[in-house]
Image (cartoon, rainbow, N blue to C red):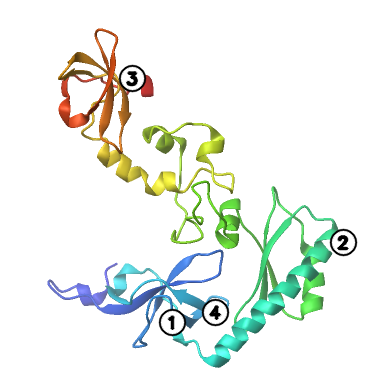
């Protein structure tokens, strides 16, 4: 059902000012209502979240959007962080390191098949969250009881995936740069092997997998570029006319906008795609299929 303010023809939708904020919850980004607070990218602020007050980092400039764009009421940005807030955050970080050691000892005592990734205090210290990975389900009920008795606080054990672990911990990728998931990617999107095929990459798992063991994130966000750049290239298997004779395309170089052609006399030549003319297009990707 449309909001009442849009029911009249031509009525302008009601707007609200929002901002995207990066919380520590496995590195996810959320929208928050910002009101009239002056916020800038990379600044920190205190927000109201589902689990109480939290702090986060601003990752976008405030913008005005129609209220109808969001199905549920958004939580509010409460304030920019103050000196006292910074003191509280630093104390939480120090205490989380100690809590990690305590939890590791308890995991060993209970002999649980789980890997503790990180520990986080909520800003208001009402809850302590323990992030872990495991190959299957873990019965950690007794562990939770022991942790609650020790910390005198609400305890949450949150199982995360290996991609979330990489995002939280960070690291260096096979390209030699910091992990995409730990730097600029906001959310994980589905990745499949077809994307690697369409980028003409080796299907060796060691070459197309990240340190998390899953397919590289860059296969996903670079894929549209490869699709767009390959539109005007002759397909592998197509018969083309070149300045040195007619032949068949045996390889595409998408980023270089070149093709390798096998001529009728057995010679192979590499040419810019603009220098060849398609005589007969292959219906499929030929050898690339």
Asked whether the residues under the numbered discs 2 and 1 touch, taking CB atoms below 8 Å apart as contact, a structural biologist would say no
Q: Nearer the viewer, residue 206 or 32?
A: 206
Instruction: Tell me the distance, in whole angstroms, between the alpha carbons under discs 3 and 1.
Output: 55 Å
Sequence-wise, the earlier of marks 4 and 3 is 4
Quadrant of residue 98 within the rendered picture: bottom right
Instruction: Tell me the distance, in whole angstroms, between the alpha carbons under discs 4 and 2.
Output: 32 Å
Badge 3: how crowded within 10 Å, few (<14), some, or many (20+)? some
Badge 2: how crowded within 10 Å, few (<14), some, or many (20+)? few
Residue assigned mark 4 = 54
Residue assigned mark 3 = 286
Badge 1: how crowded within 10 Å, few (<14), some, or many (20+)? some
Instruction: Tell me the distance, in whole angstroms, between the alpha carbons under discs 2 and 1.
Output: 41 Å
- Point out residue 15 in the picture as x, y percentages from the top left corner: 26, 78
Q: Quadrant of the N terminus?
A: bottom left
Residue drawn at x 55%, y 44% as measured from the top left: 214
Residue drawn at x 53%, y 42% as measured from the top left: 209
Quadrant of residue 68 within the rendered picture: bottom left
SS class, disc 1: loop
Residue assigned mark 1 = 76
- In this image, 12 relative to 96: left or right? left
- Point out residue 59 in the picture as x, y percentages from the top left corner: 41, 71
Any part of residue 239 in sight: yes
Sequence-wise, the earlier of marks 4 and 2 is 4
Q: Nearer the viewer, residue 159 or 226?
A: 226
Of tags 2 and 1, the one toward the viewer is: 2
């Amino acid at each position: 059902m449309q909001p009442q303010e849009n029911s009249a023809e031509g009525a302008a939708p009601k707007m609200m000012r929002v901002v995207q904020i990066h919380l520590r919850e496995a590195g996810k980004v959320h929208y928050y209502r910002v009101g009239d607070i002056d916020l800038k990218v990379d600044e920190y602020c205190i927000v109201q979240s589902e689990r109480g007050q939290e702090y986060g980092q601003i990752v976008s400039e405030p913008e005005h959007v129609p209220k109808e764009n969001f199905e549920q009421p958004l939580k509010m940005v409460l304030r920019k962080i103050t000196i006292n807030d910074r003191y509280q955050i630093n104390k939480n970080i120090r205490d989380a390191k100690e809590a990690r050691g305590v939890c590791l000892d308890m995991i060993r005592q209970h002999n649980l098949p789980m890997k503790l990734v990180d520990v986080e205090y909520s800003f208001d210290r009402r809850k302590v969250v323990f992030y872990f990975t495991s190959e299957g389900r873990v019965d950690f009920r007794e562990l939770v009881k022991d942790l609650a008795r020790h910390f005198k606080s609400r305890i949450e054990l949150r199982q995360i995936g290996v991609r979330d672990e990489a995002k939280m911990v960070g690291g260096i990728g096979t390209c030699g740069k910091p992990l995409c998931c730990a730097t600029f990617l906001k959310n994980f999107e589905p990745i499949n092997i077809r994307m690697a095929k369409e980028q003409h990459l080796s299907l060796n798992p060691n070459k197309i997998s990240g340190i998390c063991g899953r397919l590289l994130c860059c296969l996903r966000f670079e894929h549209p570029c490869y699709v767009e750049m390959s539109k005007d290239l002759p397909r592998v298997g197509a018969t083309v006319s070149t300045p040195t004779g007619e032949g068949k395309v045996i390889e595409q170089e998408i980023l270089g906008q070149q093709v390798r052609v096998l001529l009728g006399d057995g010679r192979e030549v590499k040419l810019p795609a603009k220098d060849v003319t398609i005589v007969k297009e292959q219906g499929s990707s030929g050898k690339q299929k």
